[in-house]
Image: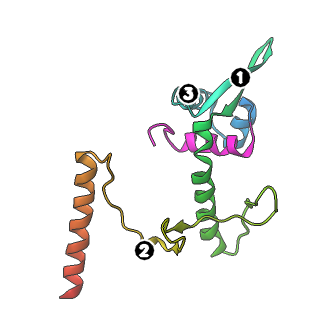
């Protein structure tokens, strides 16, 4: 999240994933102010998510493209879009985006998968545990969450 920054960073990355590249297109798409857009583009560039390339010299103008690191965020943005779509579906609204396999045209969806069996999982089937890189703060967060779950379970069993 530190590399993305804030909601404006997410919107800029969304637009870059969609294929927008020019400053004015990014500004128009997001409704962001010039000062905020300029600041967020610099932040995303400094964090290695996008690169700036000059396409005009007089006046000097740039376009922005995702780096390999920036392209890795695309699946997360697609997942967020599909979650938002599922919320809108309950209101009878149609999805504004459709994700398809470039070669076959078949619809693409995101799901949780057990990597050892290939079985699809529901979110409630997944437990979060400390990984090898967990620091003391992350271990504390997980212990607090575990304590809260146990307290909830004890409350319900009474």
Mark 3, other Cα within 10 Å: few <14 / some 14–19 / many ≥20:
few
CA distance separating discs 2 and 1: 44 Å
CA distance separating discs 3 and 2: 40 Å
Query: Which one is in front in this view, the residue at disc 3 or the one at disc 2?
Result: 2
Res 125 label: 2
- The disc, 2 or 1, on the residue closer to the chain's N-terminal end is 1
Reply above or below: 34 against 75.
Answer: above
Name the outermost residue toward the front: 116
Any magenta on residue 13?
A: yes
Res 28 label: none
Res 39 label: 3
Measured as percent of width and height from the top left, residue 112 is found at: 52, 67
Measured as percent of width and height from the top left, residue 30 is found at: 66, 42
Res 53 label: 1
Q: Residue at x 51, y 39 (%)?
A: 4
SS class of the residue under badge 2?
A: helix
Measured as percent of width and height from the top left, residue 68 is found at: 62, 37
Q: Horizontal placement of 139 versus 72: left or right?
A: left
Where does the magenta region start and end? 1-20
Any magenta on residue 86?
A: no
């Amino acid at each position: 999240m530190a590399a993305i920054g804030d909601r404006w960073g997410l919107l800029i990355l969304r637009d870059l994933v969609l294929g927008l590249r020019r400053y004015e297109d990014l500004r128009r798409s997001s409704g962001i102010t010039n000062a905020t857009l300029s600041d967020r583009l610099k932040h995303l560039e400094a964090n290695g998510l996008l690169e700036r390339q000059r396409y005009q010299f007089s006046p000097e103008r740039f376009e922005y493209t995702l780096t390999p690191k920036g392209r890795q965020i695309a699946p997360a943005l697609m997942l967020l879009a599909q979650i938002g779509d599922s919320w809108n579906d309950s209101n009878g609204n149609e999805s504004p985006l459709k994700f398809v396999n470039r070669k076959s045209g078949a619809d693409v969806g995101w799901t949780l998968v057990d990597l050892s069996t290939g079985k699809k999982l529901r979110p409630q089937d997944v437990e979060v545990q400390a990984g090898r890189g967990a620091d003391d703060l992350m271990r504390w967060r997980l212990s607090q969450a575990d304590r809260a779950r146990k307290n909830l379970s004890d409350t319900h069993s009474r």
